[in-house]
Amino acid sequence: MPAWETLKKHQNELIRKQLEGSTFIAPITSSAVSALTGPDKALLALPSGYNDLGWLSDDGAQFSSDVSTSDVTSWGAVEPTRRDVTSDVTTLQVNLQETNKHTLGLYTGVDMSAVVPDPTSGEVAISKPDRPPLRFWRVLTIGVDMGDAGEIYTARFLPRASVSDKSDQSFNNGDDPTNFPVTLTGYLDSTLGFSERFFFGGPGWEALLTKMGF
């Protein structure tokens, strides 16, 4: 029997963290993100229409998965003999700290293309519609880590997402700024054929491909 030290394969250089990152949104009419990096392993420019939502709270970008299943039980079996996935929904929670045109539009659900500052005072007024329309976005979140060979990028792309929930907003003079906390739910893009895509790249990632088993 091999010794445990010979049998195990623990590689601490494969443990990832997202040291910083951003969430970008674009109108659903914008092109989808098809690649994160180019032949030089550097990040590619995003398609036209993508805007960084800016600083997020310390919680960063919180992804959740809600998976529902349907089980078949059988006579004499002590566990399900068949299980089918009936629902697999991805949500993204971000607590937006910057007050800008894009965070205001995402939080209020208003089409900001029609909102212009008052030409005299610069004041901006946004009226919440009686029945806000369901607006869809392309959403890309990129996290950045560091490896021995350089930056490592981990990204999750929701090609068709909408705001499904908003958390409370507080006006105060404490340590927390005025936040815009929203939850986005991803849906299937029928043209692309998926509801979520993962990307991994960068010079640090390429250098670890063999160790990761690729």
Image (cartoon, grey):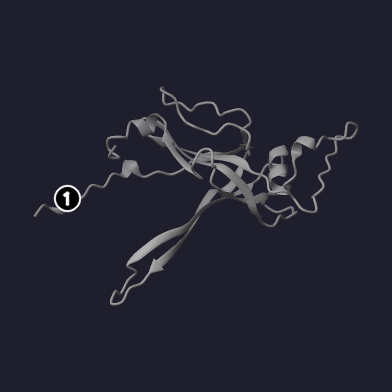
Numbered disc total: 1
Across and down, in percent, residue 118 comes to 87, 35
Residue located at (75% from left, 38% from top)? 112
Across and down, in percent, residue 182 comes to 64, 51
Q: Is residue 100 left or right of residue 117?
A: left
Residue located at (26% from left, 47% from top)? 10
**Residue type, mark 1 in image:** Leu
Residue 61 seen by the camera: yes
Q: Is residue 161 left or right of residue 73?
A: right
Of the pair 19 and 165, the residue shown nearer to us: 165
In terms of image quadrants, where is residue 110? top right
Across and down, in percent, residue 123 comes to 85, 38
Identify the element where label 1 is drawn: helix
Q: Check disc 1 and report the residue beneath it.
A: 7
Residue 148 seen by the camera: no
Q: Is residue 110 left or right of residue 29?
A: right
Residue located at (70% from left, 48% from top)? 107
Of the pair 105 and 186, the residue shown nearer to us: 186
Quadrant placement of the N terminus: bottom left
In terms of image quadrants, where is residue 27? top right
Across and down, in percent, residue 191 comes to 53, 38
Q: Is residue 95 left or right of residue 18?
A: right
Task: Work out which residue is located at the far bottom of the displayed protein and give it.
Answer: 76
Of the pair 157 and 13, the residue shown nearer to us: 157
